[in-house]
Image: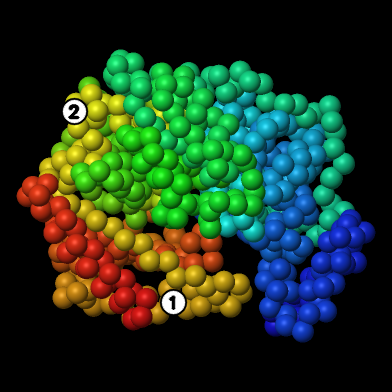
Amino acid sequence: MNLLETSRHKAQQWLNSPTIDEDSKKEIKKLLDAEDGTELINAFYHDLEFGTGGLRGLMGAGSNCLNRYTVGIATQGLANYLKKSFSGEIKVAIAYDSRNNSSSFASTAAHVFSANGIAVHLFSELRPTPMLSFAIRELGCQSGVVITASHNPKEYNGYKAYWNDGAQLVPPHDKNVIKEIKAIKSFEEVKFAPNASLIKAVSPDAEESYYRRVIDILPNKDIILKESNIPIVYSSLHGSGIAMVPECLKRLGFTNITVVEEQRIPDGNFPTVKSPNPEEHSAMEKAMQWATKVNADCLMATDPDADRVGIGIKDDKGGYFLLNGNQAFSLLMYFLMRHDKNPSEAYIAKTIVTTELLDAMAKQHQVECVNVLTGFKYIAELLREREGKKRFMAAGEESYGYLTGDFVRDKDAVSACAFFAAMAAAARHEGKTLFQWLLHIYCTYGFYKEGLVNVVKKGAEGQLQIKEIMQNFRKNPPAAFCGERVARILDYQSSEEKSNGTITKLNFPTSDVLQFYTEKGTKISVRPSGTEPKIKFYIAVHAPLTSPAEYEKVSLELENKIEAIGKIMVNG
């Protein structure tokens, strides 16, 4: 059968099921009756699967969408696997963000777990994803779920599943859960009727414990007391960060926090932004306006589930400078490495597409830097493997996710906001700005600059196009970029590195990622997104910076180089 026939067949199965509600059936009938079958195909051509960010898709009726039934099937599959993996009492924690239907989907998951005899700790109000990760370990749960689509547009929602270490599912658990989900042949196999006696609210004690842990690991707390009145601007972008970030900052001692009022109220329609993604300049505009108004030392905005944070700092011209994820993580590591008494005993972690400035900084400070595949779950897996063996300092990724301390096993924007506020206080105490810190980093370790080009390919046809693009790069790899010969090619799918005719094995799990290194150290990474319908081109270049006065000149040169390489990657 072709995609349209397959989709029609699956849609008819949904219509014939006595479990599906009438409103969903009406929506499916509209899709079946439409002359153009594109929407029908996109809704039913396959079943959602766990990627780097779990289960994620457009909300609506269909096997490829987020709805009560796909959430139910995913939960039943996870419940089946938990019962095979653990004996005795099984407990799970469930949280949700501000997205439309998040609370409802969280209730569905709680009902299905409880119907399977699994005890549920359900947050009674929206809470950040890192709080869910923390609660799993704090409450001794075997698993957990958070309902969120992170920073995706408002039409999306998602389902992130976690294991007993507070980390997202990794092999073999993710694949085993998928097997259990695929083994469910009808909605009648899903236990939707709840056992209310097994569902209870998460105690406020868990949150209190989280705040204490953040305060414990923060260096230079005495400086915060001296600079407690520095102006800080925060926006939750209508998300769950409002429930914890301002409170965490207050508990650290900060007294001059301005919350962006227009974006304070949780709202799944995200009415004041085009996209609730702090990686995008437009999402940060209102926070920047407030920062200018109150002359803030730094501004921060978290995405809907508060696992990512965008940071803005004062530049040297009186305006504000939005840091990208690489710059923000570099500043965080500069702060931590300076205050670490035994750096050689510690390690940091980052993803293979995150700036190599971190590798250079770590080497000079004698801190081990471990690179892992893209996806914070691989960083969490590393923490589990090294627990009790070597001290963890921090981790980060270019896509605005950071982690300090090991009590959370996912990226954590709540603690990240605490650390960046502390960094702004430390810089002011030195009579400097965070921007001046950044220039010092570039002059000391090298000026590393990165760019990201996203090419969106939506729907079933888009997935095929992305596969074809990756195949073409493997069959016909570029020989050079901007006059620089490609010296190394790393293919994480075949686990091979090709360098000057020599092939060596890569010690990484297989993943659909390609990296090209030129003879001068330029790095280009290519990978399909695990959570969005796009292919990503990461471009990294670097040059020496002899003095802060040369910053703009060298920055422009590197920017032009990134732009030229980006055109080559997109246009061939």
In this picture, residue 240 sits left or right of residue 373: right
Residue found 34% across the figure and 26% down from its top: 230
Residue found 59% across the figure and 22% down from its top: 206
Q: Could you tell me how far apart the alpha carbons at marks 1 and 2 are, in whole angstroms? A: 50 Å
Label 1, on which residue? 469
* Relative depth, front residue between 500 and 569: 569
In this picture, residue 303 sits left or right of residue 329: right
In this picture, residue 296 sits left or right of residue 92: left
- Does residue 29 appear in the picture of this structure? yes
Quadrant placement of the N terminus: bottom right
Q: Residues within 10 Å of mark 2 (few under 14, many from 20)?
A: few
The dot on residue 431 is: 2
Identify the secondary structure beneath mark 2: loop
- The spot of residue 172 in percent (x, y) is 56, 49
* Relative depth, front residue between 81 and 213: 213
* Relative depth, front residue between 538 and 189: 538
Quadrant placement of the C terminus: bottom left
- The spot of residue 42 in percent (x, y) is 67, 71
What amino acid is at disc 2?
Answer: Gly
Identify the secondary structure beneath mark 1: helix
Query: Quarter of the image holding residue 200?
Result: top right
Q: Earlier in the sequence, mark 1 or mark 2?
A: 2
Dot 1 and dot 2 residues touching (CB under 8 Å):
no
Q: Is residue 169 above or below residue 405?
A: below
